Amino acid sequence: MVTNTNLFQPTNFKIVIDRKKFPNLEWFAQSVDHPSVGLQSANTGYMRVADVPMPGDKLEFPEVTFNIIMDEEMKAYQEAFDWMVRLVEEPFTPSLKATDTQEASEHDITLMLLNSANRKQKSIVYKNAFPTNLGNISLAAENEPVPILVPISFQYLRFEIN
């Protein structure tokens, strides 16, 4: 029986990564493209007639993309860029082995879904995420200023819905 007929509003969300290390990525998050989840099928032969599809044995999680508003000091962009540079230049450090001097290479990203009263209803946690693509910055001389959005894609191990 349906008891809550309030529909989810696409503007009711908040991103949480690590407030000390990525405050601008959290603050300037404008939109999220939550990805699909795939379950590949495995075909099994059946009496020389046809292949019978059976459920696969693993889930596939494509990248998640966040669109970030570009601030005039490019702080959010710089945070993502610096994270990607660290991934290339420093040894990989799992989050469990991170210390004060050795920063983790990956972080959990939480997408908090808010209800109509702006209270957390559900969370989607992208486990062990790291940036894989820092998108284009499109500049254009127009009559009306519009905010510049930069897509940032993250790969992750899996997501959990809490």
Image: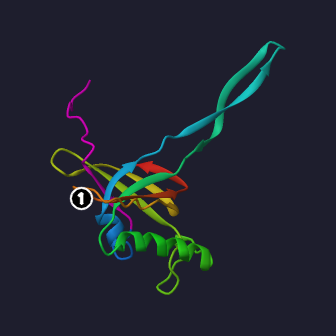
Residue 94 pos. (x, y %): 57, 71
Q: Position of residue 140 (x, y in %)?
A: 34, 59
Q: Quadrant of residue 27?
A: bottom left
Task: Please give left or right for residue 71 compared with residue 52 in the image.
Answer: left
Q: Give the camera-side residue of 3 and 91.
A: 91
Q: Nearer the viewer, residue 129 or 79?
A: 79
> Does residue 67 belong to the magenta stretch?
no
48 on left or right of 157: right
Tell me the residue that label 1 is attached to: 145
Residue drawn at (65%, 35%) of the image:
56
Q: Is residue 4 found inside the magenta-colored segment of the image?
A: yes
Q: Classify 160 as above or below 133.
A: above
Q: Is residue 43 above or below residue 59?
A: above
Q: Amino acid at mark 1?
A: Pro
Q: Is residue 69 visible?
A: yes
Residue 102: % across, % down:
53, 83
The residue shown at (61%, 74%) is: 88
In which quadrant of the rendered view does residue 53 lie?
Answer: top right
x, y (%) of residue 74? 35, 72
Q: Residue at x 17, y 44 (%)?
A: 116
In terms of depth relative to the viewer, which is nearer, 79 or 49? Answer: 79
Q: What count of labels does the image hold?
A: 1
Name the residue: 37% across, 50% down. Answer: 32
Q: Which residues are magenta?
A: 1-17
For the question of whether residue 97 can be seen, the reply is no
Q: Is residue 35 above or below residue 39?
A: below
Main SS type for the magenta part? loop
Query: In the displayed image of the protein, which residue is found farthest to the bottom?
Result: 101
Question: Label 1's element?
Answer: loop
- Of residues 73 and 48, the one drawn nearer to the viewer in this rendering: 73
- Quadrant (top left, top right, bottom left, bottom right) of the N terminus: top left
